[in-house]
Image (cartoon, rainbow, N blue to C red):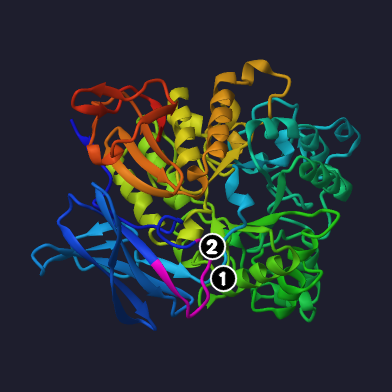
Amino acid sequence: MPAAAPPLAHHDGSALYVRPGPPALGERIPVRVRVSKRSPYNGVVLRAMADDELYLDQGRPVAEDDWEIWYEATLSVHNPITRYRFLLLRSDGRAFDWLNAAGLQDFETSDSADFKMTVFGGAPHWSVERPIYQVFPDRFARSASADARPAPAWAVRRPWGQTPIPGGDASTSEFFGGDLFGLAEHLDHIEALGAGAVYLTPFFPAGSVHRYNAVSFDLVDPALGGNEALAALSRAVHARGLRLIGDLTTNHTGSDHEWFQRAVADPDSPEAAFYIWLRHPDDYVGWWDSPTLPKLNWASQELRRRYTTGPDSVVARWLKPPYDLDGWRIDVANMTGRHRGQDLAHSVARDIRATVEAVKPSAALVAEHMHDASRDLQGDGWQAGMNYAGFTRPLWTWLADPANDTNYFGLPLSVPRRGGRPTARAMREYAALLPWRVAAAMWNNLGSHDTIRFLSLVSDRAVMRAGAAFLMTYLGVPMIFAGDEWGATGVNGEHGRVTMPWDEPDRQDGEMFAAYQSLTALRGAHPALVDGGLRWVLAEDDALAYLRESADEILLVLVARTDWPGAVLDPSLLRGRRPTLLHGPADLIRSEAGYAFPSCGPAAFIWQLS
């Protein structure tokens, strides 16, 4: 039977090891590393880089108990991003291993996974405290006033409750008529679920139901209730102590956007410089070569003034009263400002960050990126990103139904089935590429409006509930796509954008809702799940386990995707502490030899170690 045990040495960016908050440039700060007494190591040296040159500091023992020794070294924050790792000396005095953010390394590793100390502030704490709830406005709720409004010219009306079609051009025209007044009427559901913020996909007028092809950034789509509806929603959200996050498309506009129409009509207009032309007026760059989504040219300073930097810019305007948005999620952030030899993505991110912090310092700024966003997420621009690469994709490969036929994020195959070891490795190694403050603020999701519904991927409600427990306990911020808490299904993004079944009890999975509700409540009651460190303790084919730790508490999380052989708990894991089951269908198994994990699944278990 395998054994669950903490790593022989560990460091992360949580308050157990590093002082909270960004240090000042040039400051010298203490950093700590814990080393098991059962390890072969008898000394620690900090290895860091200053102006890309090596410097070292000898670690000093500062605390110990029967199980481990804590060492402290001094890190000089010489650069805005200072990379460091630890050299762990073996007892023979010659051999050593490295400890970096990806774990223990017994080879000469590169600096890419080094720990990163940055001088940049992180995401606001409210944005990590409670889950984010994603709403696709057309499908969430209809108010009584929605019936009196004319449908947009592009719209094909559908009755509430009908299943959306799974693709094709017609899917962008299906109009169910949800509006922002309707959303305001159902905030009690979001509050009861335990979410702390509502993230709205775009609310600007556009040429489709998804509204990522905006025709203006100056008003709220009348089909959603107009400017008055957004202002009323904002007041209602804030009255409940919740937050409201909008969605901006900085990579492109719609081809019917007022800027693009002026650009086409007049090559000498200021707006003509907002786009990338191959030959005016008919040949231009579009997102994925789509002529309906002309790509913005961020070399234009006038575009920046209107969109990102001016006092009345698009970014700034909606953060102010009466709308008072609490932040932005940036669509297609990975492609923004990038085209062939041009790469202005970082400067656009920094512009938006500066405006957000000047207008509303408490606001959040999160980037969409479905791939490896680590080069864009070093802390000086986007505060965090949607964690498809470091959470969604690995977890999908572990929990997906082996017989699924879901396309794996554009690759020419369905989602593969992998064991727990490669899953944990993928999650650990991606997180290692990010500064801790960024990794701890990443939006984790089981699925979104752009993907298959998670229940359709795993084909098992028990597996989905286990996945939800992983979502609520792993490092980062849980993001729930509206409907998941009631067991919504859908084979892809369009098909999964189902209407909420307010008056259809047969579509409301009460057991699923109760599971989500209890997990959000548990996360809210245990700060270690919000601000604590993370140590992996088990990675088997069918089970994963980790510790979430703060100075005040330790939580042990086990997720099993099926029945499995179980595992004994090494005494160094509990260290004499008493485990108390907080969540799960079975407790630890006690014997004269100690404790063992239960072998049942699919299920998730959470223990508090007193």
Lateral position of residue 460 relative to residue 236, left or right = left
Residue at the (35%, 58%) spot, across then down: 11
- x, y percentage for residue 20? 51, 61
Residue 24: within the magenta?
yes
Find the magenta span and give its range: 20-30
**Closer to us: 510 or 451:** 510
Lateral position of residue 19 relative to residue 100, left or right = right
Between the residue at mark 1 and the residue at mark 2, the CA separation in whole angstroms equals 8 Å
**Closer to us: 166 or 350:** 350
Quarter of the image where the N terminus is located:
top left
**Residue 488 visible in this rendered orientation of the protein:** no
To which quarter of the image does residue 28 belong? Answer: bottom left
**Residue 66 visible in this rendered orientation of the protein:** yes
Specify the principal SS of the magenta part.
Answer: loop
Lateral position of residue 241 relative to residue 229, left or right = left
**Closer to us: 264 or 421:** 421
Identify the residue position indicated by label 2 in the image.
334
Query: Could you tell me which secondary element the residue under label 1 belongs to?
Result: helix
Q: Amino acid at mark 1?
A: Ala
- Mark 1 or 2 closer to N-term? 2
Q: Is 447 above or below relative to 476?
A: above
Residue at the (53%, 52%) spot, across then down: 386
Query: Could you tell me which secondary element the residue under label 2 belongs to?
Result: loop
Identify the residue position indicated by label 1 in the image.
345
Furthest-right residue in view? 148
To which quarter of the image does residue 351 belong? Answer: bottom right
Do tag 1 and tag 2 residues touch (Cβ < 8 Å)?
yes
Local crowd size for mark 2, using a 10 Å CA cut-off: few (<14), some (14–19), many (≥20): many
- x, y percentage for residue 595? 26, 28
